[in-house]
Amino acid sequence: MKRIIFEIIIIFSISTISGIFYAFIKKIEIFPYDTKIYIFSKKYPEIKLLKTNEILKMKNIIIVDARERIFYEKGHIKGAINIPYDEIKINSYDFLKILNKDKEIVIYCDGGYCEASFIVAEFLIKNGFKNISVYIDGYPEWEKKGFPCEKNIY
Amino acid sequence: MVIRNGKKRGFLVKKIFIRIFSVLIGILFLYSGILKILNPVEFSLTVAKYGILPEKLINIFSVILPFIEAFSGFFLISGIFIKGSSLTISLLLLIFTIAISYVTIRGFSFECGCFEIIGETKTGILLIIRNLILLFLSFSIFIFKT
């Protein structure tokens, strides 16, 4: 029994030391201030990330809901247009037609760690759009804070 | 005499099988660990999607866990610390299975962040069954060795 505990302690110790050393070399923040922002900004460095308070200050923007159609119809940010992440390959032409390249585009999905916004953001960047941001808190946060929402409008 | 020889042969066959399984599971975990070490951000995001760990612990967990997998796999292949590494791997598989079951019950499905080389990689029932088989094998190695 003692032998097994000893072996496990050795494995865990070597792994912890190696992991921390690796994080140091790779400049990975072990305890970032905001984990969500940190992970997404590392994975998608070209996309700007916004929180709720920053969205509220912005004017003249296009808001895009990247969730599936069914969720958009159940409720979305007032004035948002729906570009479902699962339909961008099928209806790409229609989606690109309704957006204005000169305006700032803010994309959102379910908050948390949903990647739908980033899939749509990457699609737009590939198609020549430059002012793309992702609203990182997403629809649940917007709704929870009581900001304007609407339903079943497409 | 005949019985003793039979027992000896049975023991030898068992030993060979255990060695084969040790190497196979070792390779699997070493590969999986290295893959995660090479893609730390991708793995952090997968850990975050499970929604089990507090946000503050996601990065430290994502940095240390791949090394635990890789070292346990390496020890299992090399034949050093077989008891400790097989028990560690069994514990890891048990934790992974609980985590996958938790997200499956909640109705989520995403890339599991586990061994891409063997079959299903999306969270779901198939993945739970696969993990249980691996858990059985790794725990058998531990039981046999002790």
Image (spheres, coloured by chain):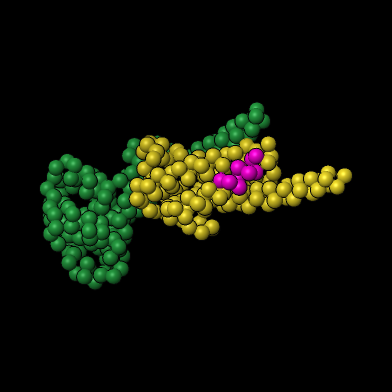
Chain colours: A green, B yellow
Membership of B14 in magenta stretch: no
Q: What kind of secondary structure does the magenta stretch mostly adopt?
A: helix
A79 sits to left or right of A141: left
Q: Which residues are magenta?
A: B135-143
* Residue in the image at 30% along x and 68% along y: A89
Q: What is the quadrant of residue A15 in the picture?
A: top right
Q: Is residue A120 above or below residue B96?
A: below
Residue placed most toward the observer, B133 or A39? B133
Residue placed most toward the observer, B130 or B52? B130
* Residue in the image at 53% along x and 48% along y: B132
Residue placed most toward the observer, B108 or B65? B108
> In which quadrant will I find the N terminus of chain A?
top right
* Residue in the image at 17% along x and 60% along y: A81
Q: Could you say where residue B103 lies in the image, as x and y percent from the top left?
A: 38, 47
Q: Is residue A20 above or below residue B21?
A: above
Q: Could you say where residue A21 lies in the image, as x and y percent from the top left?
A: 52, 39
> In which quadrant will I find the C terminus of chain A?
bottom left
Q: Could you say where residue A127 lies in the image, as x and y percent from the top left?
A: 28, 67
Q: Residue furthest top?
A: A2
* Residue in the image at 22% along x and 67% along y: A95
B27 sits to left or right of B115: right
Q: Could you say where residue B74 lies in the image, as x and y percent from the top left?
A: 63, 46
